[in-house]
Amino acid sequence: MSGKLTVFFDEPFWVGVFERIDNGKLSVCKVTFGSEPKDYEMWDYVLRYYYQLRFSPAVDVVVKDSKKNPKRLQRDAKRQLESTGIGTKSQQALKLQQEQNKVERKAKSREQKEAEEIRLFELKQQKKKEKHRGH
C-alpha cells in the first residue's frame, strides 16, 4: 500500500489530491483548501482527517516495484514539485467518484420530493375533511 498527496493551485483555491494504491487499485480523494496550506498544516490534516476521507471507487493501475538510485529519486521528486496537476488515472477515479455522488444525490432528492408530495396530498385531504365536518 502506498499513498501520495499532491497540492496545487486550482484558481481560486488550493486543492489537495490524495492518491492511495492498494493491491494494484488506485483510489483518489480531492480536498479543497482555502489559502495556501503550510507543510505542518497538511501533516496535521492528514493525521486528523485521513480516515474520514471519502475515496473514489478503485481503478486498476499497474504498479512497478523496482529499486531506484537515490539521485534518481531526488530528481523525480524535484520534477514532481515543478509539475502541477494530477495523473490521468487519478482524474478517472475522481470522475468516477463524481458520477457516484451525482447518482446518490439524485436518488436522495427524488425521495425528498416524493415525501413532500405525499405530505402535501395528506394535508389537502385533511383540509377537505375538515370542511365537510361541520355540515
Image (tube, rainbow, N blue to C red):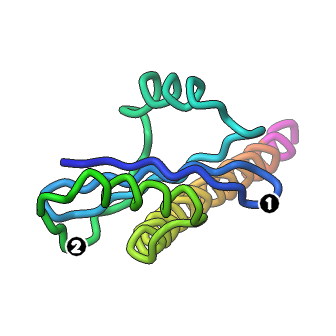
Residue at mark 2: 60
Distance (Cα) linking label 1 and label 2: 30 Å
Q: Which residues are magenta?
A: 130-135
Sequence-earlier tag: 1 or 2: 1
Instruction: Report helix, strand or loop for mark 2.
Output: strand
Q: Look at the image and say whether residue 26 sits in the magenta stretch.
A: no
Pinpoint residue 133: horizontal percent, then vertical percent: 80, 39
Instruction: Tell me the quarter of the picture where residue 114 sits.
Output: bottom right
Q: Residues within 10 Å of mark 1 (few under 14, many from 20)?
A: few
Q: Amino acid at mark 1?
A: Glu
Q: Compared with residue 37, is residue 128 higher up or lower down, i.e. above or below? A: below
Instruction: Tell me the element at label 1.
Output: loop
Residue 51 position (above or below residue 121): above
Per the image, the residue denoted by label 1 is 11
The residue depicted at 41 percent of the width and 33 percent of the height is 50
Which residue is drawn at the image coordinates 18% and 48% (left, top)? 1
Residue drawn at x 87%, y 42% as measured from the top left = 135
Q: Is residue 123 left or right of residue 112?
A: right
**78 sits left or right of 11 in the view:** left
Depicted 124 relative to depicted 133: above or below: below
Q: Type of residue at label 2?
A: Asp
Mark 1 touching mark 2, by CB under 8 A?
A: no
User: Neighbour class for label 2 at 10 Å: few (<14), some, many (≥20)?
Assistant: some
